[in-house]
Amino acid sequence: MTNILLTCQGITKNYQDGDHQVDVLSHLDLTLNSHELLAITGRSGSGKSTLLHILGTLDKPSNGEVIFKGQNVHSLNASKQATFRNNELGFIYQFHHLLAEFTALENIMMPLLIAGANRAQAKKRACAMIKQVGLSDRAHHKPSKLSGGERQRIAIARALVNEPALVLADEPTGNLDSENAQVIFELLRELRDKNGTSFVVVTHDTSLANKLDRVVNLSSGQLCNSGAKAS
């Protein structure tokens, strides 16, 4: 039996631009299963990042609901939404956003420290996570001493260190060459298999998208299934 992790129901997002209303998302529906790797494609400006931000409670829909594990996350107050993001979600961006003054290991520890874990607990979990992404030997290097692919793998480790149920990734291979993009795909699949994490990946990289379990295309404010893909 399929275990549904997240459902979007009638998500609409519009903005007012002077006298004109700009419709970005229009009565959009989406279902995401546990342990699923989902790609969202679409032209620039189609609203992919807006949708990702709504899923992550970083933006609010004009109408509609995002149901996560049976809870309408946009009905939560700001404090509870922050707790939800820290406990249930991980975020990966095109630009890694690592903190330059901290080592790779310290960057991975950061979400745990913010969540209230003591330093010893945070370090133990971060060491396990950096080992999973194959960079234990780079643990004490600062981001400036890491390659682009290594920085993105550290960012992925940071996103997963809290063991979230869902990771939202916005163009995670956008700044990488094809070889490093392949490494990132294999890492996402491996982490899904090991940790049971679901991923929603917004991407222009059709090669990456077609390797995920399912691809949906965002056009005219709505999603169209592009078919199931082998993972």
Image (tube, rainbow, N blue to C red):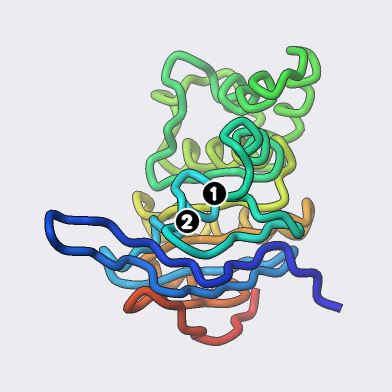
Q: Residue furthest bottom?
A: 227
Helix, strand or loop at disc 1?
loop
| Residue type of the residue flagged with mark 2 | Leu
Q: Nearer the viewer, residue 120 or 140?
A: 120
Q: Quadrant of the N terminus?
A: bottom right
Please give the label number shown on residue 56: 1
Asked if 158 appears above or below 24 in the picture, the reply is above
Which quarter of the picture shows residue 153? top right
Label 2: how many Cα within 10 Å (few below 14, some 14–19, many 20+)? many
Instruction: Pinpoint residue 53: horizontal percent, then vertical percent.
Output: 46, 51
Instruction: Pinpoint residue 165: horizontal percent, then vertical percent.
Output: 72, 51
**Is residue 180 visible from the viewing direction of this image?**
no
Between the C-alphas of marks 1 and 2, the distance is 6 Å
- Horizontal arrangement in the rendering, residue 154 relative to residue 126 (left or right): left
Residue drawn where x is 66% and y is 30% of the image: 136
Q: Nearer the viewer, residue 201 or 86?
A: 86
Q: Nearer the viewer, residue 20 or 187?
A: 20
Label 1: how many Cα within 10 Å (few below 14, some 14–19, many 20+)? many
Q: Residue furthest right?
A: 1
Residue drawn where x is 68% and y is 67% of the image: 36
Instruction: Pinpoint residue 87: horizontal percent, then vertical percent.
Output: 71, 38
| Residue type of the residue flagged with mark 1 | Gly
Please give the label number shown on residue 52: 2
